[in-house]
Every structure is written in C-alpha cells, then in structure tokens.
Image (cartoon, rainbow, N blue to C red):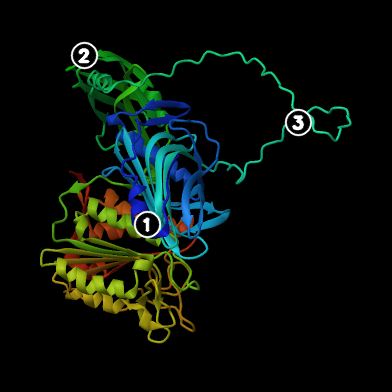
Amino acid sequence: MARCTALPLLLLAALAACSTKNLASDGLQLCRQGSCRAMGEPGREDLARGLYQLFQAASGKDLVLSEEKPGSAEFRGRGIRVFTQGGPFPAVYKGKALHVTDVLYLDLGEGVIKFKARMRGTFLFVPVLCAEGTGTVRILSGREARLELSNLCTWLGPTSYWKLEGALDRVDVDGGVVGFAYGLHGGGVPVVGGGSGYLLAKIGAEEAPETEKRPEPKAPKLPSVPVPSLPVPALPVPPLPVPSLPTPPAPSAPTPVEAMEELASAPVATLSAKLKEAGGDSVIDAGEAFGLTVELNNAGLAAAKNVRLLLSGTPALTAALGAERALGDLPAGQATASEVKGVLAPTTPSQAGTLRVEAVSDPGGVLLGAKTFRVALRGRLEEAAEVLSELDVDEIPAATKGVGGPDDAALVVGISRYRDKDIPGVRYAARDAELVAKYLTRVAGVPAENVKVLTDETATKSDFEAYLTDWLPRRVNERSRVFVYFAGHGSPAATAGEAFLVPYEGQPDFPSKLLPLKSLMASLEKLPAREVVVALDSCFSGAAGRGILPSGARPLVSTVETPIPADRKLVVLSAASGSQVSSDYDKARHGLFTYALLRGLRGEADSDSSGAVTVGELYKYVREQVGKRASLELNRDQTPTLNPSEPVAGERLGIRLSSTRPK
C-alpha cells in the first residue's frame, strides 16, 4: 500500500499528492459460474451487464473490503488502511466496507452505472460516520472500467470530504466480488490524508477482527529445575540446517515491443446478428420456427483460430437452437456468415426471453463479439398482455430520433427525504426523478443541458421557484416543449382546500413554506412555450402514500382543483384522483405511476405503432396499467387523471412525447 501523509494546513498539497488520476489496471477479467475470461473491446455490453447484476445484488448490503496483492483472487476481509492526520492524532483509517444503499440505473449508451453508497470504517477504533453519496461505474471499453464514490464524513467533529476511485480488473458476478486498484483521498479541518493500493470487495463477506489475535505458541512442559542466583552465561546454540528449496523463476513481463507485437497479432472482429421470427414483431409463438443469422468479419492482422458461436439465455430458446456451433478458422481480412434455425417448443409458456450470442476463438476463449436479443415468448394467446411484465425500466433505453428539438427543456424534482424528520420520507421519489430525467434525454429528445434535476436538499422552495421563474424562461421560446415532473409529498391546505407541493423544508401546517399548485400552473402558463406537459407523482388527499395532511385538515376531493381551459397549452398527468393514494411499487423500486410512465415512454404506450408516444396514448396506458396493478397487487384503487379531461383536451392529446425509432 502506498501512503500519502499531510498536516491539516497542507490540505491542498496533500490532495494533489494523493491524486488517483493515474490509477490503471493491466486488463479486466469477467467471471461467471467459476470460469474467468479476459475481456476484449467487443465485451463492453457484457461487462456492463455483469457489473450491473453484481451491484443490484449488493443493493442494501455491504461490499466488504480487503487489501490484497494486485491480481489476487483470495479474499480475507482485512479492510484497507490509509494514513490519516486527525488533528494532533496521526493514525491509520481502516476502511471496512462500502454500504450500497441503492442502484439507480444502467445506461448502456453512456456505459454508466449510477448507485448510492456510503463508506464504513474506523479511525483510532472510533467509527467514522459517512452520509450517503453518489457513485458511478464508467465502463469505458471492454477492457477498462472505473469506479468513483464521494462521501461527506465526520469523526468526532467537523465534516470532511472523501473520494474513492478505482480501476477495475476483476468482476466475479456469481461470487459477488469486484477487484480494483484504488485510491482514497480527501479531508477537511482538522482531518486529511489518503493512500492507494489494491483491494477486493465482496458482497456480505465476514470481516476480520479489528485487532488480529494470533494464538500463542505452546512450549513443551519441562520439569522444574532450581536456578542459581548467579548469572548464567548464554551458551551458543548452533543453527539448525535448513534445506534450501529451489525457487521457481518469476515469470518475466513482456517487453513493450513484445506487448505491441502481441496486440498487433490478435484478431480484431466485428459481429452482427439478426433474430428472425415469422411475424417480424419480436414475439415468438409456441411451435413457431425462428432463426439466428450471424455475420463475423475479421479485420485484424491474424487469423482467428477455432471460432465458435456460444448461445445462452432463456432455456426454451437455447433448447431450440443449441448451445454451440463451430465455425472453424477465420483468416485475417475475411468474413463468414452462419444461420442457426429452430422451433420453439409447443409447450413453452408466455415469458420475457433473452438470447445472447457470443463469438469466441482460441487460445483461451477470446471474445470476438457478442449481442443480446430480448423477445417475447407467447404461449396461450390470453397470456400475451403479461409477456413484457418483467422489463427493467432501470436499464436506460438507447437514444431515439424523430421527437424533440434543441429548444425543449425539463425541470425534474424528486424528494425522498425531508428536513423535518416528522414528515415521512417518500421512498423512491429521488430515484424516480433521476430516471425520468434520463428518459427525457434519451427517448423524448430533450437536450441534456436543458434538463435540471432537483432532489432532496437541493429541492427547496426557493430552488424550485428560481428554476421555474428564472431558469426555464431563459431557455424557452415559441418552438419549445416543456416538461415538469414532481415526485414527493402533496398536501391540501388546512382551511382553503387548495393543493400544495411540499418542498424539502416544507411543513404542512405552514402554507408559506409550501408551493401552491395554482402558482406552479400560472408560472408555466406564462412561458412562451408551444406545449407544456406536467406529471405529478403525488397525491393531495392527505392519505397515506405520497400525501400528508396539516393538523385538522380534511382530505381534498380533487387532485388539481381548477380544471384547465381548452384554449391553453398546458396538460397535467396526475398519479391519483380524489381521495386516493399515490402508491409506491416496491417490486420495481419506483412510484407505481412513475413506473408505468417510464414503460409507456419507452414505447409500450405506442398503441398505433406509429413510432411515437402521444399524450393521449400515454394517459390511456398509464391509467390502465396503474389501475390494474394497484387493484391486483396492492389491493387498492388508484386512477391517474388527465387535466384537461380527454373530451376537452382536443389537439393536446396528440402532443408527441417520445419516440421508439432508434438513432
């Protein structure tokens, strides 16, 4: 372990000295089912999915840390040790674990996994308390992935800022282990320090004791012999002969020239594949014939030896097509094509299916290329409506085209934690907002620089009003579409029966600390935008869920108390109506309304298969999905509303919200 030391007055110099920008790994291995393979450039998607699966398994658990030798696969749970100066106390910080609190999303397009976590450790045997921070894993290629996590921590006093960075070299999905060269640095007043090394992090592993206790060696019992009081000269003890064992020579590292020659002699292949089914609709019916066409092009300087296609995924698909197909050698500069055909078993039940095809070659099963397909397997016709029920909305869809423009803008707000601890949290509101913002940039065509996300302590009333009345008007013109999304508590007033949004510091008993829904709508109406769409995952009845009551208040009868006239540009989608509850949906870790909203935006609401989702289509889809799931799975009523209503909305029902056409 390399250590960086500093005194509090030398904070800036210490942080520079402990910089982790030069962290690097010598390659990356992905391990599944006890078998590890070195990743290549085409393996970026496979690596991203493996890391996403590992972090999802770690959500709500500890990734226990252990400092090991670089490249080691043996986990001993010893923690990591970094020199830290805590005021007058120079000592070693022992990092024990990363507690992963949430995994927000996987963005394959950008190669990013976003998560929430906090470091856990001790300094002078006293726990260091860290607040939840945001972390990212960036998959830069099939051979390179980097981790970053920032935390605000405190130890017996003031707060300090710490940043953990790592260059990954090992991802064991089934074993729940990730290995990386790390750097940890940071500080504040009066704490500063940092260091670097190599660690393994394992899900839920046991930690070694804070102070290791080794058993004392047991000497043989000897008879008691009287010892004279005079000093006894020490007798020389001849050393025992120790046989010398031959030491195997250490493997020599390749020279730079050898490494370059090795890279130049490797095959460089590109893989394209198509899954063909009779209907051409990404649905394979039980008993239907289908096929997989694979084209492989070797653009490298060396032949690819013993090329094989490996198929994995849903058992019904691999049973029909087989698990492996040999293609032979593929000379440099040449291409080959192969087609595999099969029939889906007649007894196959309806389910969401995946099929992954990999092209590998010798030596060592080098991955030449890979592609994953997602299809619906349809058994009985009446089950078709449930085929897509297992889609993961946290996997960000690929960018689409045909909807959106450079003048569009969005304000997205989600509040999971409130400053007043008497106000219950809204479990998934902040992550709802994060996902909605990503979807707006990917499938709704809103430029990323025109999307503002406010969560928790950044979503105060003054923040909300500033972005609503200052930030938005500067970005909007007569060509703009504007989106406003809010997830958090809503509240009725105690006397006036008016609806309010509850900002981070809001209190239901003090209307001056709340944001009137009427004021929000008035501000949006003043914008020079062409269209304004508002989505509210809140309820204003004061019932449980995403609504709260001030003292003595009665439930509010309507969600948006004043109907919006037909001649205005505004349309509002609300999560619930009347005295209903806006529910959380634990199965998906989102609000139920937001979960349906995301699924609809990514294409499931495109009822006429036009390639675009409109306001009318999204409302019908969300109303049906939310009503059905709330009744069957949550045993309650929840009916989303549209304001103005469908008969009054007119042309606004045709506002194009998102596209399903890939770029």
Q: Amino acid at mark 2?
A: Pro
- Relative placement, left or right, of 460 versus 526 is right
Q: Give the CA separation, mark 1 to mark 2.
A: 59 Å
Please give the residue where the numbered disc 3 appears in the rendered image.
218
Q: Amino acid at mark 3?
A: Lys
For numbered disc 3, what is the local secondary structure? loop
Q: Residue furthest bottom?
A: 495
Q: Earlier in the sequence, mark 3 or mark 1?
A: 1
Neighbour tally class for label 3: few under 14, some 14-19, many 20 plus, Cα within 10 Å: few
Q: Quick one: 600 or 246, which is closer to the camera?
A: 246
Please give the residue where the numbered disc 2 appears in the rendered image.
331
The picture places residue 83, in percent across and down from the top left corner, at 47, 48
Task: Indicate which label's residue lies in the foreground, 3 or 2.
Answer: 3
Q: Earlier in the sequence, mark 1 or mark 2?
A: 1
Q: Is residue 532 above or below residue 358?
A: below
Q: Report which quarter residue 564 is drawn in.
A: bottom left
